[in-house]
Structures are given as C-alpha cells and as structure tokens.
Amino acid sequence: MHWFGDGMWFGWIFMVLFWGLIIVGIVALVRWIMTQNRPPKSHTEESALDILKKRYAKGEISKEDYEEKRKQLLS
C-alpha cells in the first residue's frame, strides 16, 4: 500500500528541521562571537556608589552629603 505518497513528506519535514537547526546554530554562533568581542560591563561602567566614594575621597562633597546620598542609594 502507498500511504502518504510513499513517505515523501518525511523527507520534507526532516529537510526543514535540518535547515532550521543550521540557521539557529549560525545565529547562536554570531551572537556568541559578538559577546566575546565586548569588554565586560563591570570594567566600563562605574556604579553610582563608586562615583560617590570617589567624590568623597577627592573632597568634592562633605561627610554629611556622602552619608545622605549613600543612604539614598542603598535604600
């Protein structure tokens, strides 16, 4: 008996799945390569608390200002 055209539809399903996996793999590889070239976020951006500590260390703000702003940032 010939069901569903001798099973030819299986070939189409597997072909679509194969090419779908190839495309997903290429996209994943490109995204991975793009993240490898980017510097880590922690090295490029300072937190607000780090900036506040530096300003206090340089004498740009008083101890009272430092404490007040620190409490605001940590709450």
Image (cartoon, rainbow, N blue to C red):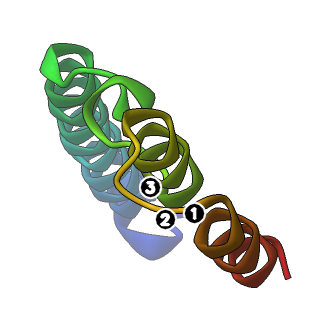
For badge 1, the amino acid type reads Met
In the structure shown, which secondary structural element does the residue marked by tag 3 occupy?
helix
Q: Is residue 37 above or below residue 62?
A: above
Give the quarter of the image for residue 58: top left
Q: Is residue 36 above or below residue 44?
A: above
For badge 3, the amino acid type reads Gly
Task: State the CA–CA distance, disc 2 to disc 1.
Answer: 4 Å
Give the mark nearest the N terminus, 2 or 3.
2
Q: Nearer the viewer, mark 2 or mark 3?
A: 3
In the picture of the structure, the residue carrying the numbered disc 3 is: 7
In the picture of the structure, the residue carrying the numbered disc 1 is: 1
- Report if the CB atoms under discs 2 and 1 are less than 8 Å apart: yes
Q: Residue at x 18, y 19 (%)?
A: 33
Give the quarter of the image for residue 72: bottom right
For badge 2, the amino acid type reads His
**Around disc 1, counting alpha carbons within 10 Å, would you say few (fewer than 14), some (14 to 19), or many (20 or more)?**
few
